[in-house]
Image (cartoon, helix red, strand yellow):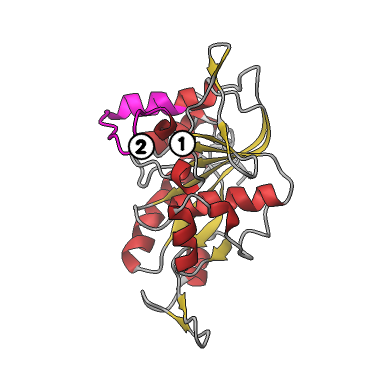
């Protein structure tokens, strides 16, 4: 099987797949953009810390000197701007939109930056949500970026499908947590990516354990971590195992996630 060929076509002897037959609508970059790599972060279910992982990946890359952007595709549940303490409205440029920059210079575009109030709900049907995500790719002046991180909504619905079909993804990072339910559902996301011909770059198990602040013992609140077994069974790389950390939650709530110190994601970049 070729590097880009999906297993479903390989099993049928289709040597000409290359993934393209499942991605008929890949959109070109605008004249204002030069983005080298596009990575998406996906989870099978909500509540596993997918957006936190997206933010930490972006911060890890930025600290290494890469130019990074985050496209917040979780349109109905956006949390990226709050984590970075961003509340300024994006400016217009030549019928396009300029992303808002974080303290480290990470370019961010999210629907929450365009709403009158950050707690206003977005009550839209799937096709409208998908079109918004496409416009964040075609109409935003990202400029020159080494990496654009796409924070997907949980599940395998309209928006993840749109991103996989329409954006030139280099790969997906899958986020899960130790619970059996979460790992069962994340396998659905892995199979979706395989069907679409999108390579899985690896898996992150979040909230794997809690470290006692007094003795340093690792307490497996949700049961013993099975990250290595899950990754091996899925045939993908285990990128990171992250703990439950009150400090991370505190900084994210205060819009200061870029101040969080961690050894995670220093193995970046993934591609």
Residue named by callout 2: 118
Residue named by callout 1: 87
- Helix, strand or loop under label 2: loop
255 and 142: which one is in front? 255
145 and 201: which one is in front? 145
256 and 151: which one is in front? 256
177 and 120: which one is in front? 120
Task: Answer with left or right where residue 130 lies relative to residue 61.
Answer: left
Q: Determine if the magenta segment contains residue 162.
A: no
In the image, the segment drawn in magenta is 114-133
Which percent across, then down, holds residue 188?
37, 52
Residue at 49%, 62% (x, y): give it: 248
Which percent across, then down, holds residue 122?
29, 32
Tally of numbered discs: 2
Residue at 39%, 56% (x, y): give it: 186
Please name the predominant secondary structure of the magenta segment in the image: loop
Whether pointer 2 and pointer 1 mark residues with C-beta atoms closer than 8 Å, the reply is yes
């Amino acid at each position: 099987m070729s590097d880009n060929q999906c297993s479903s076509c390989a099993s049928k002897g289709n040597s000409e797949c290359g993934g393209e037959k499942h991605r008929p609508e890949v959109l070109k970059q605008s004249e204002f953009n030069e983005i080298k790599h596009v990575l998406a972060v996906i989870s099978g279910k909500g509540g596993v810390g997918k957006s936190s992982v997206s933010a930490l990946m972006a911060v890890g890359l930025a600290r290494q000197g890469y130019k990074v952007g985050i496209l917040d595709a979780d349109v109905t549940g956006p949390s990226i701007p709050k984590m970075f303490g961003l509340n300024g409205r994006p400016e217009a440029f030549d019928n396009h939109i300029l992303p808002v920059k974080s303290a480290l210079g990470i370019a961010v575009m999210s629907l929450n930056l365009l709403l009158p109030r950050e707690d206003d709900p977005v009550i839209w049907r799937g096709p409208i949500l998908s079109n918004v995500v496409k416009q964040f790719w075609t109409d935003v002046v990202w400029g020159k970026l080494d990496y654009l991180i796409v924070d997907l909504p949980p599940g395998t619905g309209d928006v993840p499908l749109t991103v996989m079909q329409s954006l030139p993804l280099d790969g997906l990072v899958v986020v899960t947590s130790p619970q059996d339910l979460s790992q069962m559902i994340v396998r659905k996301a892995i199979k979706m990516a395989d069907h679409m011909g999108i390579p899985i770059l690896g898996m992150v198990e979040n909230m794997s354990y809690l470290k006692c602040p007094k003795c340093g013992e690792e307490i497996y609140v949700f049961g013993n971590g099975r990250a290595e077994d899950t990754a091996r069974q899925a045939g993908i790389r285990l990128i990171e195992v992250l703990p439950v950390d009150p400090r991370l939650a505190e900084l994210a709530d205060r819009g200061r996630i870029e101040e969080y110190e961690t050894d995670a994601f220093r193995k970046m970049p993934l591609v």
